[in-house]
Image (tube, rainbow, N blue to C red):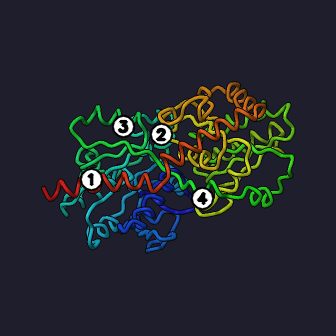
Amino acid sequence: MRRFTPDKWGGTESVVFNLSRELIRQGIESPVFCTAMFSKPGVQCLEEVPVKRYRYVFPWLGLSPEAKAQLRLKGGSPLSLSLFWGLLKERNLSLIHVHVQHRLGGMARTVARLRGIPLVVSLHGGHFTLPAEQVDKMTKPFRGKLEWGKAFGLLFGARRVLNDADAVVCVGQSEYDEVHQRYPFKNVFHVPNGVDVDRFATADGSAFRSAYGFQPPEKIVLCVSRIDYQKNQLGLVRAFAAFAQDLPDHRLVIIGPVTVEDYHEQLLAEIAMRRIQNRVLVIPGFAPNDPLLPSAYKAAEMFVLPTRHEPFGIVILEAWAAGLPVVANRIGGIPGFATDRENILFAEPDNERELADRMAELAADAALRKSLAGNAFNAAASTYDWPMVARKVLEIYGQLAQNLTD
């Protein structure tokens, strides 16, 4: 992993943590190797999962402290030679599963080749389809700087991670189709993300309402996602402002770690400009094991995801497990596992009026909320519970192990 700290948790971190924990529970040692970004070098256990963190650098000359801070939050390809040596010397290593590309992925590739063990690469979306606008924003901090780390990228085969992988795992159907087309003779698997169904299904919504002072008549519209231009909370605030004009009891709650500070400031300014500060609550993220996170889902009337780019949408699974009806943009990998008016309501991307209309439709129709939530919960429980997903990953590992012995 690039980084693995609870206060900067995103969808990929959630996937890796839950997968590692399930593998450990099924008797497979599964430590996480990552940089010490937002942390310190050393070994820490997050519940049952050992996390091994290593020193790193961003290998460009002339980076300002502000640019480095931006790269820690989003983008940037760090170099960590101590991680490479740690992985190379790890005892009893039988397989490497990498969740990052570029230099760190190249290091994993090189260790796997040196040790003669399988390499599995997970693509968490956007590898071939990341919008140009996002690429531009992510590369801005080091644009025009001399990249002395290119030599290490060549040494470790950073551009050959997918080519040399023994298996590629895609969380989204559309990305699976793309990879299968580009690499027709490679082992490519579609394994969706998972959710801890019991954790969200049995949560108590009153804990969140009490912690943040919500009164019984107040109804919560919830959004959980990184506070980031990709997630488009600005569009949600505008849609909510229109939606809430005739619905005085509704409140908007946005929860997520801040990965783009400028965007966070724009979001707060938009809320103030529309004079809805008393109706919008922004919480800069919860630790992954904080009971207030599933409680927030249980406390809400509906869940809304206004994202502009979404390879999968694990937060939709969390809402489904909590029994929440969901409104989301029809984008990325979401239509690959969700069906309009069966277990979700879709709006078209960047259409704030339609997003507001879908929210209003849910607010006005209790039968629709119940139908969507019931179908969604059944899908989460029958297909996406983490033990089921982990078993699919173990089957892939087993295939690769068998190939080595044949």
Q: Is there a contact, CB below 8 Å, between mark 4 and mark 1?
A: no
Q: Is residue 345 above or below residue 388?
A: above
Q: Is residue 363 left or right of residue 291?
A: right
Percent x, y for residue 193?
Answer: 46, 48
Q: How many marks?
A: 4
Separation of disc 3 and disc 4 at Cα?
29 Å
Q: Amino acid at mark 2?
A: Pro
- Residue marked by disc 4: 199
| Eye-nearest disc, 3 or 4 | 4
At a point 43% along the width and 39% down the height, the residue shown is 172
Q: Nearer the viewer, residue 44 or 156?
A: 44
N-term-proximal mark, 1 vs 3: 1
Judge the density around disc 1: few (<14), some (14-19), many (≥20) Cα neighbours within 10 Å.
few
Question: Measured from the top left, where is residue 44 in percent x and y?
Answer: 47, 73
Mark 4 neighbour class, 10 Å CA radius: few under 14, some 14 to 19, many 20 or more: some
- Residue tagged 3: 176
Q: Which of pointers 1 and 2 lies earlier in the amino acid sequence?
A: 1
